[in-house]
Amino acid sequence: MSKCPYCDNEIHLHDFFYITTKETKKGKTKQRIEGFKGEEIEQSLPGFGKQVSRNWACPSCNKTLSITEFAYKWD
């Protein structure tokens, strides 16, 4: 697993996303990523919709690991 460069704690996927677990009719369990736990910043761009950036921070020391610009939300 990956570790935070500042505090050396392990970072898992469930630290950043809400994950729901469901059981199928056959008895298997499936996990689905529902939403982002961190801070999202929306910036309005004329003619393009909204650009969304995410702030990825370590859950234990709360230092910023990365800021990503990932998608446009169309109006």
Image: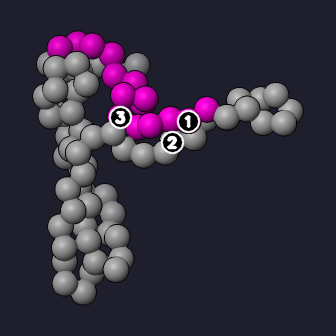
Percent position of residue 29, x then y: 71, 29
Q: Amino acid at mark 3?
A: Phe
- Disc 3 from disc 2: Cα separation: 10 Å
Label 3's element?
Answer: loop
**Which circle, 1 or 2, is nearer the viewer?**
1
Label 1's element?
Answer: strand
Quick one: label 3 or label 2, which is nearer the N terminus? Answer: 3
Percent position of residue 46, x then y: 19, 84
| Label 2 sits on residue | 33
| 67 left or right, relative to 19 | left
Q: What is the number of the mark on residue 16?
A: 3
Q: Amino acid at mark 1?
A: Thr
| 74 left or right, relative to 23 | left
Residue 33 to residue 57: above or below: below
Residue at x 41%, y 37% (from the top left corner): 17
Residue 23 to residue 71: above or below: above
Examine the image and state in which quarter residue 71 appears: bottom left
Residue at x 34%, y 22% (from the top left corner): 11
Give, as a single range, the part of the protein colored magenta: 7-21
| Label 1 sits on residue | 20
Considering the image in quadrants, where does the C terminus appear? Answer: bottom left
**Label 2: how many Cα within 10 Å (few below 14, some 14–19, many 20+):** few
Percent position of residue 13, x then y: 42, 30
Number of residue marks = 3
- Disc 1 from disc 2: Cα separation: 7 Å
Color theme of the render = one colour
Q: Nearer the viewer, residue 20 or 46?
A: 20
